[in-house]
Amino acid sequence: MHIVAKHLTKSFGSFQATKDISFEIEKGKLIGLLGPSGGGKTTILRMLAGLEEPDSGDILFHGKKVNNLPPQERGIGFVFQNYALFRHMSVHDNIAFGLAVQKRSKQEIASRVSELIELTGLKGLEKRLPHQLSGGQRQRVAFARAIAPEPQLLLLDEPFAAIDAKVRKELRTWLKEMINRVGITTIFVTHDQEEAVEVADEIMIINHGILEQKGSPIDIYQHPQTPFVAGFIGESNQVEHIGKFKGFTQAELKPTKAIIRPEYIEVGYPNEISVLSAAEFGTVTNIYFRGTHWQVEVEVNGQKLNAYRSMELDTLKLSDPVHVLIHRVYMFNGQEHRTVENSLKTDPLPVHI
């Protein structure tokens, strides 16, 4: 399903949930609605589903305005955060429910349910009730029930929120594979950036009812268009007076916000720094073991920065004098945004983790 939303605005009393949001979603895409709690993500999902009516703006499916179309006529499958399975129905009957409502033949229902049982890895569990299943299994049943009537659009409201971390990681991979196989345009809500980056073809970042940015995970990560996006996706350092740092003296805009990701900072002893002439002196103020790397907090020019350091390098110690090289900075001044490279270096950004 091809979707176009034009200037969607929705308020609940004095609270404005969405503010003039417009976007387009291509058929077959897997889209992640990402942002902090209360940002408007679920409101967008519910407006698309027909469970909420926008105060203003239009929703078009395949070029047809659907604002006044009831949910059951929109060709949508919906998976809720709490699964919303029928507790008295077996796995088989839960999956078959939508098909029965459509008055499909018994033979057609049996064939479709069997196909989905196989597809979702639920074989052997057909007769179990929801309380006899694990959280991951219940989520698979909810997914199978939603796609059983062959909807054109699948909506998922924080589908992994109620599942423990290990199973959640497994289900992310499973969901992406399933969506690719069935080919349904899918939109899922999450506040977990790792989840969105791993699963989605494209991400829409929603904050305070505003669409901050839409694009592929790698594009949003490497080319954030607002300070919020730069700070929300990945880890970041916000720096005041970036012009004090070597290689950025001519870069500063007035007024400006400068954000640096930890992986764009080298920190270490002089012989470890790729371009020593572009580096600052600093002092290690904290160091944290992160499993695959060290996270080092260093004070330089009166500013505390967090950087990553490879496990292959010597371990730094508190109060160690070090050199700090900033490779790249994201800069924002009102509507203007740009990525600025350190002007004193010409080598490519090294990768230490």
Image: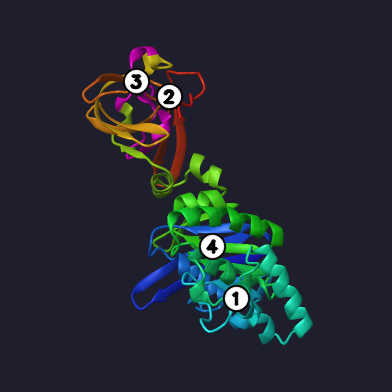
Q: Earlier in the sequence, mark 2 or mark 4?
A: 4
Question: Which three-letter amino acid code belongs to the residue tagged 1?
Answer: Val
Quadrant holding the N terminus: bottom right
Q: Is residue 294 above or below residue 270?
A: below
The residue at which mark 2 appears reads as: 342
Give how far across and how far down residue 253 sits, in percent.
Answer: 36, 35
CB of mark 4 within 8 Å of CB of mark 1?
A: no
| Front one among 286 and 162 | 162
Say if 213 sits above or below 252 in the image: below
CA–CA distance between discs 1 and 3?
57 Å
Name which of mark 2 and mark 3 comes first in the sequence: 3
Determine whether, in the image, residue 154 is placed left or right of residue 9. right
Q: CA distance from mark 3 to mark 4?
A: 41 Å
The x, y position of residue 178, in whole percent, is: 65, 59
Indicate yes or no whether the magenta region holds residue 251: yes
Q: Nearer the viewer, residue 127 or 324?
A: 127
Residue indicated by mark 4:
188
